[in-house]
Image (cartoon, grey):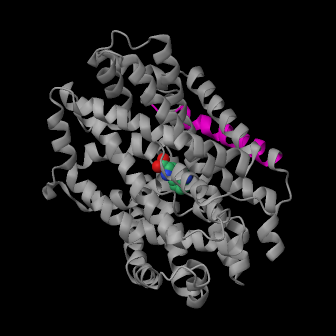
């Protein structure tokens, strides 16, 4: 055991742990998903509920995943195998690999749109953009059909190269260099956006708490999103936890990552919503929100093109570092449990992702080639998103919470989270343990059951 602990690859310092984990959390979720969902779900009230979900569900599950990973120093399947004699628990690991695929199928497509926008800004595509042409440009990006597939392949090639370089020379090096760059760029974009005339309305929308807009479905969305945001419920944080340093304070890390991630989301919202209002667009414009508002916002001002490049560059960074953590889950499994070389595992997984990801790419827009093909009433693109965010992630999170809160020996848990008593953080551990046992599973069960309710409804509807 000691030997495995020292020879297996891992992150080299606390700072590396922080940036890699934050790199996983910060992604298209902050810049693309959260702003448009805030827009559709009524602004500040949603934000408030979202932050509550982060504390009551997100952080406790994250700590549990860290524990499972670092304690065993194994991939998500191997970790469950080592901690529990009942082989059924291994299926949580397998389900996680499946959700990594489902997420990557559509995520790599959206990442491709972001990459292509960097390229198009440099080419000068957005020079004379108006509210109408912004929409057209976005739609043509999605429609392709060849170019979005090519961009998706470019995205997977970049991810593969970094992953093949390894945990230290790939993931650690890239996240440590690029996460600070991302922070600086998003602060610049946010500052520029709030100094725009008419930006006040956008800020007010983002922070105005109006509870009349909060319905039960908004609550569920917030919970699901908190999960997606923090990369939980599928083994990403188990896998990354398995690379953590022995002296890392994991409770601290989880709180710092969750807070920094929320800060990035707020900064992204601050950059996007003022633009929405000053160009008279609807905050509920959906998935295209970011792609239409940002070019409009920045193309009209001095140094606009530089800001525009900065924004889509930071979005590409966010998307890429998040994808590293998604693909690392099956890669770790294939190398450790199936004896594959790292290079082979990365290439195999990237091929799987491109192959099925094309289905999402070809159904992303109403006019896309495969947009008429519906499964359970959803396009491939929506189905992959739905199955991962609404079914597999909450189910995985629920099982992880039950596992750590009710099956693991508390002494073991305390020992690992306090680094064998050296941290003196007993009060934090007790608070975590209480929320994990009694609050987190109840909230997660509610999301999960209501997702299934939706499924039942769909089945009935299909049968007529
Ligand atoms: N958290 C990332 C985002 O917000 C996405 C992500 C990366 C993810 N790894 C994950 C989501 C694991 C769920 C599970 O964009």
Where's residue 184, x and y in %? 43, 37
- The residue drawn where x is 40% and y is 17% is 305
Q: What quarter of the picture does the N terminus occupy?
A: bottom right
Along the line of sight, the residue nearer the viewer: 186 or 86: 186
Q: What quarter of the picture does the C terminus occupy?
A: bottom left
Where's residue 138, x and y in %? 41, 23
Question: Quick check: can you spot residue 173?
Answer: yes
Along the line of sight, the residue nearer the viewer: 367 or 100: 100
Type of secondary structure dominating the magenta stretch: helix
Q: Look at the image and say whether residue 362 sits in the magenta stretch.
A: yes
Along the line of sight, the residue nearer the viewer: 217 or 333: 333
- The residue drawn where x is 56% and y is 78% is 417
- The residue drawn where x is 39% and y is 37% is 186
For residue 222, what is the image quadrant? bottom left
For residue 420, what is the image quadrant? bottom right
- The residue drawn where x is 71% and y is 64% is 75
Where's residue 124, x and y in %? 45, 11
Q: Look at the image and say whether residue 185 sits in the magenta stretch.
A: no
Q: Which residues are magenta?
A: 344-365
């Amino acid at each position: 055991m000691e030997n495995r602990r020292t020879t297996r690859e891992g992150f080299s310092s606390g700072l590396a742990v922080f940036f890699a984990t934050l790199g996983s959390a910060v992604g298209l979720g902050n810049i693309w998903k959260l702003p448009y969902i805030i827009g559709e779900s009524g602004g500040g009230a949603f934000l408030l509920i979202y932050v509550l979900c982060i504390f009551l569900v997100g952080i406790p599950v994250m700590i549990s995943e860290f524990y499972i990973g670092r304690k065993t120093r194994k991939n998500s399947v191997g970790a469950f195998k080592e901690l529990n004699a009942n082989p059924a628990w291994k299926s949580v690991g397998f389900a996680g690999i499946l959700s990594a695929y489902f997420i990557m199928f559509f995520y790599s497509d959206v990442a491709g749109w972001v990459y292509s926008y960097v390229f198009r800004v440099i080419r000068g595509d957005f020079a004379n953009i108006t509210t109408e042409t912004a929409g057209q440009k976005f739609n043509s990006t999605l429609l392709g059909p060849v170019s979005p597939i090519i961009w998706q392949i470019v995205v997977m090639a970049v991810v593969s190269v970094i992953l093949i370089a390894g945990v230290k020379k790939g993931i650690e090096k890239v996240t440590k260099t690029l996460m600070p760059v991302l922070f600086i760029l998003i602060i610049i974009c946010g500052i520029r956006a709030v100094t725009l005339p008419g930006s006040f309305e956008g800020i007010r929308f983002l922070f105005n708490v109006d509870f009349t807009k909060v319905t039960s479905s908004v609550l569920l969305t917030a919970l699901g999103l908190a999960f997606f945001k923090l990369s939980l419920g599928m083994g990403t944080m188990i896998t990354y936890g398995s690379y953590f340093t022995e002296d890392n304070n994991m409770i601290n890390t989880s709180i710092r990552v969750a807070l920094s991630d929320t800060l990035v989301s707020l900064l992204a919202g601050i950059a996007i919503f003022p633009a929405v209002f000053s160009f008279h667009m609807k905050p509920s414009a959906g998935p295209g929100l970011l792609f239409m508002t940002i070019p409009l916002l920045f193309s009209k001002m001095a140094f606009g093109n530089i800001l525009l490049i900065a924004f889509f560059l930071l979005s590409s960074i966010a998307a890429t570092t998040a994808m590293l953590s998604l693909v690392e889950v099956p890669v770790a499994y294939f190398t450790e449990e199936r004896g594959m070389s790292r290079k082979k595992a990365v290439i195999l997984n990237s091929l799987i992702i491109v192959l099925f990801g094309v289905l999402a790419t070809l159904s992303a827009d109403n006019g896309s080639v495969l947009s008429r093909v519906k499964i359970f009433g959803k396009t491939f693109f929506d189905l992959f998103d739905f199955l991962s965010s609404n079914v597999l992630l909450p189910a995985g999170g629920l099982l992880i919470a039950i596992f750590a809160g009710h099956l693991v020996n508390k002494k073991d848990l305390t020992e690992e989270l306090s680094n064998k008593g050296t941290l003196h953080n007993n009060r934090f551990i007790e608070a975590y343990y209480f929320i994990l046992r009694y609050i987190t599973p109840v909230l997660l069960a509610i999301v999960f059951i209501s997702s299934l309710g939706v499924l039942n409804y769909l089945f009935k509807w299909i049968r007529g």
